[in-house]
Amino acid sequence: MTTSTSKRKSGWRRWLFTALVVAFLWLLAQRFADIQKLIGTLAEGNRWWIAAALALEIVYYVGLAALFRSAFALIDIKTQLRHLVPIAFASLFVNTTTTSGGTAGLALFIDDIRRRGESAARATAGTLLAHTANYGIFALLLGMGLVYLYAQHDLTGLEIASAVILFLLVVLLCSTLLLGWRWPGLLRRLLTGLQHTVNRVGRWLKRPYLLPET
């Protein structure tokens, strides 16, 4: 990797970090009233229930990190849970400040694996596997909830439309995994085409290396 390429990537990371900080501050400003209301609710709430909620939240993110660890293990990438837990919490920050459907935080896992000397392509595959499993579990729970609402005659069109969008996302993720497993050449061509398209748009925005081609 050349020095100029390293500088471009370093500059891009600094720009991205600055953008995320600005976005987070903007989010705080937009939700200031909600934050005040939340603080008031916490002050008046039962501390034991609040502690239980925090504990469950921590358990969720530890479980999420364990899910990624299992996915990486399937493709022979060795990771440790204690290294993945902080990344799981960091992904919460990234996903909160970006409207990406939870995919923005995945880049943190990929970058961490790459920095540890593993293949970025395999890290991407493992991350996609974990992300698909996460959404698949949620889709299963959502399906059970929809059945309950239907039985109670309380299912609305908006809820159905939202569920269909999520199910389509799960199908898209599963299709990507299937292509990578059965027809890797086709998936490579599709991703290469997407890479070229994104970088072409990046050149218009004076950011020609949104997705590095090396």
Image (cartoon, grey):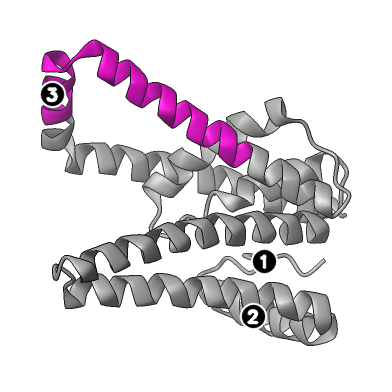
Disc 3 residue type?
Answer: Thr
Where are the magenta residues, as a range? 36-65
Q: CA distance from mark 3 to mark 2?
A: 46 Å
| Residue situated in front as seen by the camera: 117 or 9 | 117
Residue at mark 1? 211
Residue at mark 3? 41
The disc at residue 194 is 2
- The C terminus lies in quadrant: bottom right
Helix or strand or loop: what does disc 2 sit on? helix
Front: mark 3 or 2? 3
* Residue 51: in magenta span: yes
The part of the image, by quadrant, that contains residue 196 is bottom right
Helix or strand or loop: what does disc 3 sit on? helix
Q: Main secondary structure of the magenta part?
A: helix
| Residue situated in front as seen by the camera: 41 or 157 | 157
Q: Residues at badges 3 and 1 in contact (C-beta under 8 Å)?
A: no
Q: Left of 155 or right of it: where is 123? A: right
Residue at image location 37% in from the left, 77% down from the top: 164
